[in-house]
Amino acid sequence: MFAPSDSGYAAFVRAGWDRYLWTATLLTGDRQHGEELLQGCLVELYARWRSVARRGDPHAYLRRMLVNGNVSRWRRWQREQPVAEAPDRADRRSVPVEPDDALHRAMFRLPRRQRAVIFLRYFEDLTEKDAAAVLGCSVGALKSTHSRALAKLRAETSHIEIHG
């Protein structure tokens, strides 16, 4: 498990697990992939914990790891070769969103970068500057990506009635 000197890391993981699992699941579009992504990032974070914790905000560091890890996962997936017959799959646990929710389905159809911008701005509640830093882009690039993402979401969800 953890060494006694790693209690700060253990507390960080306990306090943030649900939040970061939610983020990873929304980024990947699947709870199982979200868990795999989060666990992989937490292993890497553990190896660097002392320096990350000493330098400042481990939450920002983990968010960036999740976004970058999802991009890497997507790139690996693009290189995979199709097979003649798909293997049997176990039932997947449900994603922590309503599966019939048109807005969430529309968000999962966004390109990965646009989806990341929406999640960072609205689900993680980051400022434009902080979200741009996580994605490694300028604030201007973030704003244009954000604008395109919102336009797509509006177009795909224009038929939804809001009841209040």
Image (tube, helix red, strand yellow):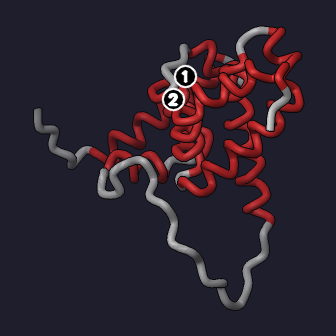
- Residue sitting at x 38%, y 48%: 97
- Residue sitting at x 61%, y 21%: 131
Q: Tag 2: Cα neighbours inside 10 Å, few (<14), some, or many (≥20)?
A: many
- Of residue 48 and residue 139, the one placed in the foreground of this image is 48
Q: In this view, does 40 lie above or below 14?
A: below
Quarter occupied by residue 41: top right
Mark 1 = which residue? 143
- Residue sitting at x 59%, y 34%: 17
Q: Is residue 81 above or below residue 141?
A: below
Where residue 136 sits: x, y (%)?
Answer: 74, 25
Q: Distance between the residues labelled 2 and 1?
A: 5 Å
Q: Tell whether 23 sits left or right of 2.
A: left
Where residue 77 sits: x, y (%)?
Answer: 73, 62
Where residue 135 sits: x, y (%)?
Answer: 69, 28
Q: Residue furthest bottom?
A: 84
Confirm whether residue 52 shows in the render: yes
Q: Tag 1: Cα neighbours inside 10 Å, few (<14), some, or many (≥20)?
A: some
Q: Tell whether 2 sits left or right of 12.
A: right
Q: In this view, does 44 lie above or below 37?
A: above
Specify the amino acid type for callout 2.
His
Total numbered circles: 2
Q: Tell whether 45 sits left or right of 85.
A: right
- Of residue 43 and residue 88, the one placed in the foreground of this image is 43
- Residue sitting at x 52%, y 36%: 18
Q: Do the residues labelled 2 and 1 touch (CB within 8 Å)?
A: yes
Where residue 62 sits: x, y (%)?
Answer: 71, 28
Badge 1 element: helix
Q: Which mark is residue 79?
A: none
Q: Quadrant of the C terminus?
A: top left
Specify the amino acid type for callout 1.
Lys
Mark 2 = which residue? 146
Confirm whether residue 114 shows in the render: no
